[in-house]
Image (cartoon, helix red, strand yellow):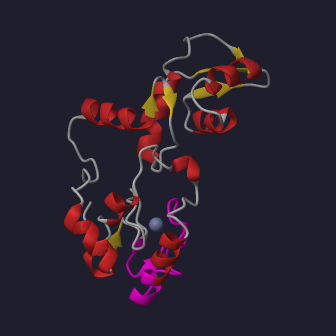
Amino acid sequence: MADDQLGEEYTCRVCGFRYDTPTWDGGSGSHDICLCCGTQFGYQDTVLDGVWSVRAKWAAEGHQWSSPEFRPPDWEPGTQLAQVPDRWADASVLAFKLSAPPLPAMRTSADPEAQRAEVLGRFLRDGRLTHFPATGREWTIVLEHIAAGFEPGVKYRRLEIDKLLKAWHGKPADLLSRLTDQGFVANDDQYYWRAER
Ligand SMILES: [Zn+2]
């Protein structure tokens, strides 16, 4: 997915974080808040001056993530800022572009197994989820992997499934609602179980 195709942009103009849904489409911002720099697409990032000043403020405050649960553990701002499209770059971004090695592009490998392994490698460490995925596709791969750990046919009580999910991440309720929303786990009033898919 290249930026500018059909007027769609997938990269935050301010911080360079990449999404798999457009941040801008046909001249309108999505109004979503950037998980990384906190820019609302379509408000603070409409003109070059705005982009530069929001970026400068974000840098002055130490490149904090607006949603820290999405921050990769070994994240480093320069590598990401180097992905800012040229027309939104300022001197600091240009310096990063010159020095930073390119990140892998939007992971468009044709081999689904390699894709799966690549995504799991980025989010799992020692059998734990290090941070939350930012895109739906990454979530699906991660949730499928977690759900595969539940015994087929076994019914778990809420406390039991929370305990299992806590072994993956400190926010088991978030994981459980995603697992049920996406149909990996089914439930009734009392029990949760791995859904047939
Ligand atoms: Zn951003």
Query: Between residues 146 and 89, which one lies in front from this camera angle?
Result: 89
- Image: magenta residue range: 24-52
Q: Is residue 106 positioned above or below 171 on the image?
A: below
Residue 4 in sight here: no
Q: Is residue 153 positioned above or below 16 on the image?
A: above
Residue shown at the point (48%, 70%) measured from the top left: 59
**For this view, does 109 lie left or right of residue 142?**
left
**For this view, does 84 lie left or right of residue 49?**
left
Query: Between residues 145 and 195, which one lies in front from this camera angle?
Result: 145
Residue 111 in sight here: yes
Q: Position of residue 31 (x, y in %)?
A: 54, 72
Query: Between residues 116 and 101, which one lies in front from this camera angle?
Result: 101
Mainly helix, strand or loop, the magenta region?
Answer: loop
Residue shown at the point (69%, 15%) measured from the top left: 156
Quarter of the rendering containing residue 67 = bottom right
| Quarter that holds the N terminus | bottom left
Q: Position of residue 148 (x, y in %)?
A: 48, 20
Q: Is residue 133 positioned above or below 13 on the image?
A: above
How many numbered discs, if any?
A: 0
**For this view, does 10 lie left or right of residue 58?**
left
Was residue 46 drawn as part of the magenta stretch in this picture? yes
Q: Position of residue 140 (x, y in %)?
A: 46, 38
Q: Position of residue 126 (x, y in %)?
A: 46, 23
